[in-house]
Image (cartoon, grey):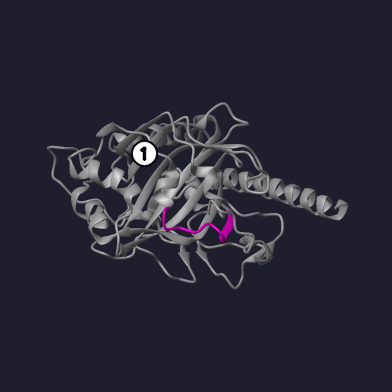
Amino acid sequence: MDAQNNEYQMHLRAVINESIATNRDILNTAYRHIEKPVMIIGFCLSVLCFFTGLTAGSSWNYSSPESWSRKYPACGGRRQSPINIDTSEAESTWLLERFTKSLFSEEPENMTLKNNGHSIQVDLTGGFVIDNMRLLFDRYKAVQFHVHWAKSNGKGSEHTINDKRYWGELHIVLYNTDYEDFESAVSKSDGLAVLAFFIYGDFSFKNSGFDKITEEISDGNAKYEGESVEISPFAIDDLLQYTFLKSYYRYLGSLTTPPCYESVTWTVFEDPIYISRSQARVFEEIVYENERGHHHEHLYNNYRPVQPLNGRTVYTIDSSRLYNFDYDD
C-alpha cells in the first residue's frame, strides 16, 4: 500500500509540474505574438469576451479556427483540445476508478437553457459535486453543460477516437472549488474539469432526458442567439439512460473555444449518449447562430478540429477495474 501511495504522490507532482510548464509556455507564446502593454489589454479583453461575448456577438467563429491564436494567444499553446484518442497508445493506470451514474443523480436547484451563438447550453445552479481523488484530483462542481453537433447526420464531435468522429459531443463543465467561483478558476491550470460524452445521433429510440431540451427548442425557446429560458430541473443522469460509464480516457488539455485556456482536466467516455434522428434534427434544423430578426444561419458543425498531442499522455482506467460493475450503472 505504501508503494501505491508513493506512486500516487509522484503522479500528482508530475501533473503539477506539467501544469506549471504549460503556464510558462502560454506566457512565452503571448510575448512572442504581441507587445507587453498590448498583451495585458488583450488578456483582459479575452476574459471579457469569454464571459460576455458568447451571448452578445463574440469576435470568433468556427469558419476559421486556425486564426483564433491571433486574438487569443493561448489557442496556439501546446496543451490544446480536442485531440484524437488512439486507444492503443493510452496508458492504463490503477490511479483511476470507475464513474457511476449515482454521481449524476442529484437534481440541481435551477436550470437555464440558452443559445449563446456557438452552442446550446444549460446553466446549472446547485450542480452536482465530484469529491473523489480517484476520479478527479480536486473537488469539482458542475456549472453547465453544452452540445456540439454536425449538419444533417454528419460528424460533429470535437474529440475523435481512433480517428472516428460521432454526430455530436456533450460537455459537462465543472470548476475546482479551491477557487471562489467559475470565473476565478477558468484561467488556472487546474481550474476546470470537463466530462465529455460522444453522441450517437441515429438511435432507434428517443432519449427521454434529451427530450427535456429538444422539446423546449421545438416550442421556440432558445432558438436564436442570446435567448434563454428557465426549465424544470432534472438530473444529468437522465441524459445517460443508454450509456455505460465503465471506460474513459483522461488527459490534460484546454477549452475548445477561445480564449482556449489550458486549464482543463478532460475525461472522455468511450460509450456514447444515444439520441434519435428526430432529436438530432432539432439541433440541425431549428437552432440558429444569429439573433432573432437578423439574417438567420443554422447553427451546426460547431466543433474545433483535433489538435496535436505534443507528447502528452492519455490515461485510461486499468482494465481489471472494468468488471467491478455497480448496480447503478
Going by the image, does 280 lie left or right of 326? left
Instruction: State the SS at label 1.
Output: strand
Quarter of the image holding residue 98?
bottom right
**Residue appearing at x 38%, y 64% in the figure:** 166
Residue matched to label 1: 122
Reply yes or no: does residue 202 show up in magenta: no
Reply yes or no: does residue 244 show up in magenta: yes
Residue 102, how many percent across, how many down?
A: 53, 45
Give, as a single range, the part of the protein colored magenta: 241-251
Q: Nearer the viewer, residue 172 or 256?
A: 172
User: Which residue is the extreme one toward the front?
Assistant: 327
Going by the image, does 10 lie left or right of 178? right
Residue type for callout 1: Val
Q: Name the main secondary structure of what is drawn in magenta.
A: loop
Above or below: residue 107 compared with residue 305:
above
**Residue appearing at x 47%, y 53% in the figure:** 196
Above or below: residue 314 compared with residue 211:
below
Q: Is residue 122 visible?
A: yes
**Residue appearing at x 50%, y 59% in the figure:** 244
Question: Number of marks in the image?
Answer: 1
Q: Is residue 193 visible?
A: no
Residue 130, how many percent across, how many down?
A: 58, 40
